[in-house]
Image (cartoon, coloured by chain):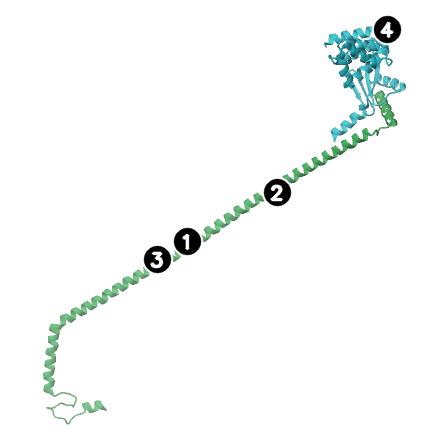
Amino acid sequence: MSDARIDGYARALFEVARAEGTIDEVEDELFRFARSFESSDELRTALTDEQVPAAKRQAIVEDLLGGKATSTTTQLVSMVVGSGRGRDLPAIIDKLVARAANSKDLSVAEVRSAVALTDDQQTRLKAALANATGKQVSLKVIVDPSVLGGIVATVGDTVIDGSVRTRVDQLKSRL
Amino acid sequence: MILANLFAADDIDPARSVHWLWPEQAELIYGSIASLLIFGALWKFAGPAIKKAMAERTQGIQTELDESAAAKAEAEAEAASIRQAAGDIDAERQRLFAEADAQAEAVLADGRARLDQEVAELEARAAADIASASGRVNDELRAEITRISHAATEQLLSSGAIDDATQQDLIESFISRVGAS
């Protein structure tokens, strides 16, 4: 899909969520769903297979998110998947998240950690990243066991890597 | 005593021999004349032949002397030639010995040089082999250490060696480090 079309979908989703007044919550849920979509081959296959009828793909979305996310989030994902754009879902959601952050004059900080961060840790980390990058950030935390330990934070093109995985890789490379 | 008896015969007859050993005088005269005639005849008729024979004999002797002298000279020349040849042989032998010595020395020097070169090549090859083997062993050792380290690290991490406290320490450390930068 072209960037213009992805932007179009992102703008549409953003406007719907903002109109609903749940942009922060929807944005967060969509972001988490996009990461799950990226990391799960099975989910990705199920939602992008053109041989599977759109109604069935939407039903899968309903089953996955129903009761776990807001109805707005579920409907937005279902709409994208039903229109056959499931393959571009992560890109669309990332654009939406970026748009939402920009609307608040924030930068998206994608944070990967092996374990979940407490609210206090997220607050302090947000402040630390703002201090380090000179930008106010919107924190998006992803629990990623492959990090092993520590945190990897990405703000725009800046990557601050304090993960055990990277240290282990560096150690392996040095060896 | 006998000679005294021969010449001391004063009392003998002059017509007879003065001594019992000597013939009578006439006989002596006739005999002498006959002898002279015979000698003259001999001188006359046999003399030339004898003289010729003597000359021939002399010539033969002279010829033999000349031949002997020639043979002697030839022998001396041959002896000189032999001596010269012997000298030449000795010189040739000396030359051959010197040449053989020189060749032997050259062969020895060449052999030594070749041997030195071969020894140097062997030493260089051995050094290269040792260095190669050392490098290979080092590489293998390094690879083995790396493999073991990887395996140990993965096993350590997969066994959940990073406990919650450590996870929290890592997160707090990251927040502190980023905040301080």
Q: Earlier in the sequence, mark 2 or mark 1?
A: 1
Reading the chain from its start, which is encountered first: label 2 or label 3? Answer: 3
State the residue in front, B123 or A107: A107
Q: Which mark is residue B92?
A: 1
User: Do callouts 3 and 4 point to residues on the same chain?
Assistant: no
Q: Which residue type does callout 2 highlight?
A: Glu
Q: Write down the chain letter for disc 4.
A: A
Q: Considering the numbered disc 2 on the image, is that residue within a helix, a strand or a loop?
A: helix
Left or right: A171 as drawn, with respect to A123:
left
Query: Which element carries disc 1, helix, strand or loop?
Result: helix
Circle number at residue A172: none
The secondary structure type at the circle numbered 3 is helix
Q: Which mark is residue B123?
A: 2
Q: Amino acid at mark 4?
A: Glu
Instruction: Return the residue at label 3.
Output: B81
Residue under label 4, please give it: A20
**Do residues under tags 3 and 1 come within 8 Å of each other at their CB atoms?**
no
Q: How far, Cα to Cα, is label 3 from label 1?
A: 15 Å
Labels 2 and 3 positioned on one and the same chain: yes
Q: Can residue A145 be seen from the camera position used here? A: yes
Q: Residue at the top extreme?
A: A19
Image point 18% across, 70% down: which residue?
B54
User: Could you tell me how far apart the alpha carbons at marks 2 and 3 are, in whole angstroms?
Assistant: 60 Å
Q: Is residue B114 left or right of residue A154?
A: left
Question: Are tags 4 and 2 found on a single chain?
Answer: no
User: x and y percent of residue A75 in the render?
Assistant: 82, 9
Q: Nearer the viewer, mark 4 or mark 2?
A: 4
